[in-house]
Image (cartoon, coloured by chain):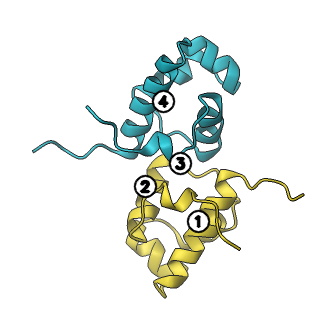
Chain colours: A cyan, B yellow
């Protein structure tokens, strides 16, 4: 049985997936969300305890809602 | 036209609503989520830039998903 993913892991996986669907780089996304590129990378890897304000900016930057970025990713 | 609510405002309104539906106090919720009572109050008022880890604990403590706590509240 696999360990249930944390919200921050799910958010990171989905953020990366949606960014890749848009064919934009971490740097492009950073610019759109007015955040730093290395920060985007750490959020995508689930390393950051990202705040709700930044979740909102990141979701807007990939054209999704925060809720959509928290849906359990399909394999 | 009213200004669109921020994610943190929506989260706070919904958290309070679900807590009240459960008829538990801020203190009870604080204990369930292992957070401080005054912190719960400030999250409910939309004053806190709450982190994803704490959103996850708060959502679990009221038996909801983070996504449910981010649904636009009905008036």
Q: Quadrant of residue B26?
A: bottom right
Q: Is residue B59 above or below residue A43?
A: below
Residue on which disc 1 sits: B39
Query: Do the residues bearing badges 3 and 1 touch, measured as CB atoms within 8 Å?
Result: no
Q: Is residue A31 left or right of residue A13?
A: right
Tell me the quarter of the image containing the C terminus of chain B: bottom right
State if disc 3 and disc 2 touch (CB < 8 Å): no
The quarter of the picture where the N terminus of chain B appears is: bottom right
Q: Is residue B75 above or below residue B6?
A: below
Quarter of the figure with residue A65: top right
Determine which of the numbered discs, if any, sits on residue A15 in the image: 4
- The percent position of residue B20, horizontal first and vertical second, equals 54, 83
Residue pictured at 47% horizontal, 65% vertical: B35
Mark drawn on residue B16: none
Crowding near pointer 3: few (<14 within 10 Å), some, many (20+)?
some
Residue carrying label 3: B51
Mark closer to the chain start, 3 or 1: 1
- Dot 1 falls on which chain? B
Protein chain holding label 4: A
Same chain check for tags 3 and 1: yes
- Which dot, 3 or 4, sits closer to the camera? 4
Q: Say whether residue B50 is left or right of residue B6.
A: left
| Pointers 2 and 3 within a single chain | yes
Residue occupying the point 25% across, 31% down:
A75
| Residue B56, disc | 2
Contact flag, marks 2 and 4 (Cβ < 8 Å): no
Dots 3, 4 in contact, CB < 8 A: no
Chain letter belonging to callout 3: B
Label 3 to label 1, Cα distance in Å? 12 Å
**Nearer the camera: disc 2 or disc 1:** 2
Taking the spot 53% from the left edge, 12% from the top edge, the residue there is A23
């Amino acid at each position: 049985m696999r360990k249930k993913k944390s919200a921050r892991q799910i958010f990171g996986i989905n953020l990366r997936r949606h960014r890749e669907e848009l064919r934009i780089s971490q740097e492009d996304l950073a610019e759109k969300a007015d955040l730093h590129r290395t920060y985007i990378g750490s959020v995508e890897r689930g390393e950051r305890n990202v705040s709700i304000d930044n979740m909102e900016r990141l979701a807007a930057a990939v054209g999704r809602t925060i809720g959509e970025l928290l849906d359990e990713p399909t394999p």
